[in-house]
Structure formats: structure tokens, C-alpha cells
Amino acid sequence: MPKKTEHFLVECPCCEATLTVHRVTGQILFTEQPKKKGLSFEDALQKHHKDKETAEDRFRDAFAKEESRMRNVQDKFEEALKHADELDEPIRPLDYD
């Protein structure tokens, strides 16, 4: 016949952690996280190369967006310079005297 203890162990179905629960109060006394499985060297190397390629792709996309934005700004600036001569002189408050 099993011996009664003051606590029992429960395994979480989500994170697979082992919880030590007090039998009477229902309080969680301890939580033991599952041990992570280590990656092999080849898997880690492959993951590193994949992350590196992804980062380079994101950088290229961001760089292209920035170049496009700068071309837009430059075009608007040049257009404004063409129309700068058409602008009226600003009215100065002291000229009313």
C-alpha cells in the first residue's frame, strides 16, 4: 500500500513542468522546469546560417525602402525648388507702418 505524503507531483500538459502541490492546501510548493534538449552541432550551425540569411534579407529590404523614401523626398525637394520663384514675398508686420 502506498505511503501518504503531504504533497504530490503533477505534470503540466502545456509546458511539461513538474509541479509539487501540497495535498491539503492545494498550494504549489515547487516548480521544476523540464530540461531543454540540446541541439546537435549540425542543427545549431544550420540554424545560425538560416538566421544570418534572414537578417541579411531584412536588411536589404529596409535599405531598399530607405532608398526609395530618399528618392521621394529628393523629388519633392526639387519640385519645390522649381516653384520657389513663384512664391510671394512674406508679409512682414513692420511693413504696415
Image (cartoon, rainbow, N blue to C red):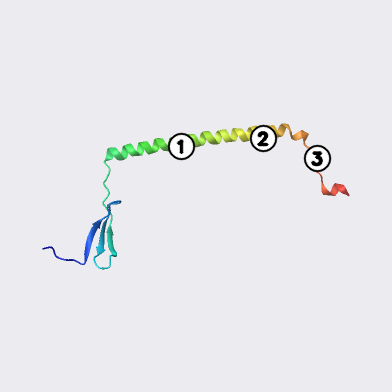
Q: Which residue is mark 3?
A: 89
Q: Which residue is mark 2?
A: 77
The residue sitting at 64% across, 32% down in the picture is 75
- Circle 1 SS class: helix
**N-term-proximal mark, 3 vs 1:** 1
Dividing the picture into quadrants, the one containing residue 23 is bottom left
Instruction: Classify mark 2: residues with Cα within 10 Å, few (<14), some (14-19) or many (20+).
Output: few
| Relative image position of residue 31 (x, y in whole percent) | 28, 59
Q: Amino acid at mark 1?
A: Arg
The percent coordinates of residue 60 (x first, y second) are 48, 34
Which class describes the residues within 10 Å of circle 1: few (<14), some (14-19), or many (20+)?
A: few
Quarter of the view holding residue 53: top left
Going from N to C along the chain, the mark reached first, 2 or 3, is 2
Question: In the rendering, at what x and y percent does residue 28 appear?
Answer: 29, 63
- Determine whether, in the image, residue 17 is placed left or right of residue 67: left
Amino acid carrying label 3: it is Glu
Identity of the residue furthest to the left in this view = 1
Q: Quadrant of the N terminus?
A: bottom left
| Numbered disc 3: secondary structure | loop
Residue pointed to by mark 1: 58
Contact (CB < 8 A) between labels 2 and 3? no
Q: Residue at x 82, y 46 (%)?
A: 92
Q: Decide which of 83, 21 is in the foreground and name it.
A: 21
Q: Are marks 3 and 1 in contact (CB under 8 Å)?
A: no
Q: Amino acid under label 2?
A: Phe
Q: Quadrant of residue 33?
A: bottom left
Q: Position of residue 91 (x, y in %)?
A: 81, 44
In terms of depth relative to the viewer, which is nearer, 61 or 10? 10
Marks 1/2: CA distance?
A: 29 Å
Residue shown at the point (28%, 37%) measured from the top left: 42
In this rendering, is residue 90 above or below 23? above
Q: Nearer the viewer, residue 43 or 22?
A: 22
